[in-house]
Amino acid sequence: MKAMPWNWTCLLSHLLMVGMGSSTLLSRQPPPLSQKRSFVTFRGEPAEGFNHLVVDERTGHIYLGAVNRIYKLSSDLKVLVTHQTGPDEDNPKCYPPRIVQTCNEPLTTTNNVNKMLLIDYKENRLIACGSLYQGICKLLRLEDLFKLGEPFHKKEHYLSGVNESGSVFGVIVSYSNLDDKLFIATAVDGKPEYFPTISSRKLTKNSEADGMFAYVFHDEFVASMIKIPSDTFTVIPDFDIYYVYGFSSGNFVYFLTLQPEMVSPPGSTTKEQVYTSKLVRLCKEDTAFNSYVEVPIGCERGGVEYRLLQAAYLSKAGAVLAQTLGVHSEDDLLFTVFSKGQKRKMKSLDESALCIFILKQINDRIKERLQSCYRGEGTLDLAWLKVKDIPCSSALLTIDDNFCGLDMNAPLGVSEMVRGIPVFTEDRDRMTSVIAYVYKNHSLAFVGTKSGKLKKGGKNLSLSRFLCWWQNWRGASSPDSSSSALYKVPSSL
């Protein structure tokens, strides 16, 4: 696929960089905020850390997943109700957990770190998954956080043994007349025999039903899951797939990941471990997971590569930015944050970039790869299958935009990286989170930084971890007291 010749002057004239001091790309600045404006904050218990936040789009109520607690807050951050999830006696080596059978490992008082928080709108409940007992989930009623169910008797109920709060990502696929599906993606922490890295589960109407979280399909040979082969760990002992973001669009479910792989530097005969950011795509209706494809993504500006994905968010293009990018206003864009390089996962460099991907272009690249593989060209080219360099098999069939795979040529990897459009780079205060939306045809994004400060007119204002720093420029009037939004964000995030 040929790279699109972007007109950077044109694109940047549509994006207003707000309050970045010497990094400001445009001289025109909006007026300072009124001194009377303030931000409402909420603080939990001193020992608590906030892990996840979701907002009910119908009521504006906020749900916070914390260590040992779930909060329900009003839109002005008043506590409405809480639900305690821990601590409890546990040991991460107990499999199955001691609540199912006696465990010979020593038990200690263990915190329950919230690892996933999702609103199931169809059944009016909250799915709250924690780190206790190999990662079991509670289903809580939205109104009062009353526990509707807590499945834990079957191996399918243990979603992940990893204790990190960012180790699990879930996407709900909803149907009008059928039970919904929950796509779960998780790091496996060296336990591929226990946990699939991606799977699709049943979301039954009855929160206490026996089939809750069961695999959508499972027989002796095929299941709705992807497991990392144990052979992979002989090549990369600490191999894992870390899931940064997930979403659904059209007929597909997507996850954005960080994965280690071994590469040979130019002129070297030895290999070194690096991290590669990849987008994973699956068909919503693919019960056998034959549609699994992953493609590397990254960003480059001024000869500097940004390859370590930090955060991502799906939004629409909006009319004005769409015209600049040559897409439709309702086309999906991925707003992503990368840090520089690709050798450090846990200690990312402070240099970072905000980049935009047009989802259709990624899908077009995947279609090209599928077509070439089904012509018998190349190998499956998947880093965690490198121990078995499996050649593509030829088959005469038409592969269109919605092709969902066969029981051949899967799972499949794309070798050529898809590059995003770099919008802004930050050299000192690493960007760590991003959110975006369309307002009056204009694209707006909020990014969070490592220091958690808002840079505005030379003054640093504490605003949680979010930084409102750019908005669409063409035709946008300066904000005033009647049109500016006041964002209320928990200060501990």
Image (cartoon, rainbow, N blue to C red):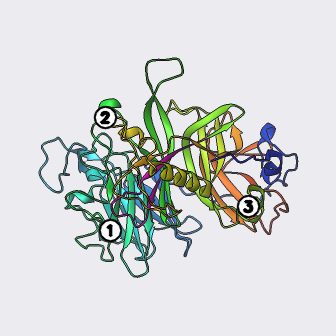
**Badge 3 is on which residue?**
322
Q: Nearer the viewer, mark 1 or mark 3?
A: 3
Image point (51%, 32%), residue name: 347
Residue 233, label in figure: 2
**Badge 1 is on which residue?**
202
Q: Earlier in the sequence, mark 1 or mark 2?
A: 1
Looking at this view, is 215 or 370 the one in front? 370
Residue 435 belongs to the span the image colors magenta: no
Residue type pointed to by label 3: Ala
Would you call the spot at circle 2 few (<14 residues within 10 Å), some (14-19), or many (20 or more)? some
Hey, which quadrant is residue 459 in on the image?
A: top right
Task: List x then y, in percent, for residue 193.
Answer: 24, 46
User: Where are the magenta residues, as a range?
Assistant: 281-298
Looking at this view, is 324 or 427 the one in front? 324
Q: CA distance from mark 1 to mark 2?
A: 30 Å
Would you call the spot at circle 1 few (<14 residues within 10 Å), some (14-19), or many (20 or more)? some
Image point (69%, 38%), residue name: 426
Left/right of residue 313 with respect to residue 291 in the rendered view: right
Task: List x then y, in percent, for residue 411.
Answer: 38, 50
Hey, which quadrant is residue 129 in on the image?
A: bottom left
Residue type pointed to by label 1: Lys
Instruction: Name the residue furthest right.
Output: 28
Q: Compared to 233, does 375 lie above or below?
A: below
Q: CA distance from mark 1 to mark 3?
A: 37 Å
